[in-house]
Image (tube, rainbow, N blue to C red):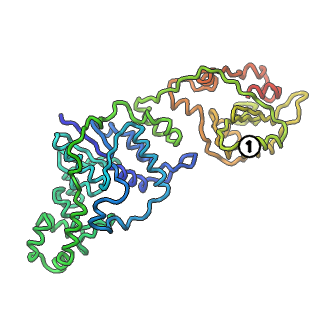
Amino acid sequence: MSKTLTIIDTFGFLFSNYYALPYLKAKNGTPTGMITGFMNFISNLGRDYKTDYILFSVDSKGKSFRNEIYPEYKANRPEAPEDLKTQLPIALELIKEMGFKSIEKEGYESDDIIASITKIAKNKGIKVIIVSYDKDMYQLIDDDKVVLFDPRKKIFINEEEAYKKFEVHPKDFIDFQALLGDSSDNVPGVKGIGKKTAAKLINKYHTLENIYEHIDEIKGAVKKRLLEGKENAFLSRELVTLKDNLFDDINLEEFKFPEVNPILKIADKLIDLDMHRIIEKVQKEGMIIPTIEPKTTQISIPSKLILDKKELFEIIDSIDGEIVAFDTETNSLNKDKEIVGFSFAFSNQAYYVPINHFYLGVPEQINLKDALNAIEKLFTKKIIGHNLKFDLDLVYKYKISKITPFMDTMLLAWILNPDQKVGLDALSKKYLDHEMIHYKDTVKKGENFSNVTLEEASKYA
C-alpha cells in the first residue's frame, strides 16, 4: 500500500479561513477567528483521512519571479486587515511549536513549492493530498496520485470532480486559465472570453498553440477577441504555470506525521487564546492533556480585612494588569442566597470585604451599595475564580453588568485532567500543598456564614 503526503497551502488556507469565519477574539483582545478555523482543521488531521507525511508550504516574503514577468501581477490586492496580520505570526508559531515542518523558497510562491514537492513525491510512488482552495492547484490533479482536499466539505477533488466544476480536464487546466485569466491575481487572460467559451475551446483544441493554429475555424466575436488578446493569453499562461523544478529531492522522513496529537504540545497556548472547545474535542477522542506536576512548596498568602470604603477602592485602583482571584460568601447555597461578603486576591495578598455579617458586637461593615460598586469595578480586571457560575449568578441578582471572566480554575482543572477531583480543596492540596480551612470547621451547626466573626471569615475566605 502506497504512502500518502499531505501538503498544506498555508497562507491560502489561513486567508480562506479568515474570510469564511466570523470575527472571534480571546478575552485578552487577541483576534482568533482565523486561528480557530485552522486549529479545527489540525484537530481533524488523521481523522478525516490517514496520512504518513505532512508539510506546510509557505509563500516567500516580497515579490515573486512572476512580478518580474508582469509587474501588475497581484497588484490589485488590497492591504490585509489588521486582525488578519495579527493572527498570521501566531498561526505560524503554532505550526512550529506543534512540531510540523514548513518550506518556503525566496522568489517563489507556495503554489510552486507544492508543485515541486508533488512532482518529487509522485516519482517516489507516494500519493499526494493538497489542502488548498486555490484553483491553480487543479492543474496538479492526477487521479490516484494527486488529489485536492476540501476540509470544509470533507471531500476529495479528483479529475471527475474537477471536470464537474470547470468542464475541463486537469491536464488542460493551465491553458484554460490562460484564456480565462484570474481577476484575484490580476492575470489578464483574453478579454471577453468567459468560462463556458474557454472550456469549449480547450476541450476542442487543448492548447493555446493549437487554438491559434486553427484560428480560422473560429468565427465571429470569439475569433476577434482571441486575436486581440493573443499576447495576453501567452503571458497569462506563463503566470499561471506552476514551477515544479525548485528542488532536486527532499527527505520525506523529516515530514513524518506525528504519532501523538500535535495539539497536546500547545494546550497552554490554546488556553491563553480561550480555545477550550478545541481541547475538549481532542479529549473526547481520548487524547488527554498532560497534567501539570504538582508543586511541593507550601504557600501562605496573608489576608487583610477591609472595613473602610476609601481603602477598598484604593486597593482596587492599584490593580494594574494582574490576574485577580474572586470569590463570594453567602448565607445559603440555594437560589435565594444573599451575599455576606466577598474576597479577592492579587500579587500574593488576599482581602476580605464583609457586607452582611450579623452577630452581637459586629463592627461596621462595607454597605451593600459600595460593595456592589467595588465588585463591578473589580470585574473590569482579569477575574479568575473557582466555579464562577455560582458567584456570577449571585452578583447578577444585584444588577451588576455581565462580564466574561478571564478563567475558571474548575474548568481549567477539568481540561488538564478530566479524571482528577476538581473541588477547590483537592486542587489546592494537589498543586499548592495547601490545606484549606473547611466550611464545617468555620460555620457552627445551625448557623450560616453571616454568623461567622469577621476575623474568622477573613481567614476562611
Where 226 falls versus 145 (above or below)? below
Residue 316 at what x, y percent from top left? 74, 42
Q: Residue at x 76, y 46 (%)?
A: 373
Read off the residue under disc 1: 318
Image side of residue 246 versus residue 186, left or right:
left
Amino acid marked by disc 1: Ser
Q: Quadrant of residue 383?
A: top right
Q: Nearer the viewer, residue 117 or 140?
A: 117
Q: Nearer the viewer, residue 333 or 16?
A: 16
Q: Residue at x 56, y 49 (%)?
A: 29
Image side of residue 302 versus residue 232, left or right:
right
Residue 94 at what x, y percent from top left? 43, 42
Please identify the quadrant where the C terminus is shown: top right
Please identify the quadrant where the N terminus is shown: top left
Q: Residue at x 51, y 50 (%)?
A: 31
Residue at the farthest right position: 361
Q: Quadrant of residue 341?
A: top right
Q: Residue at x 80, y 32 (%)?
A: 305
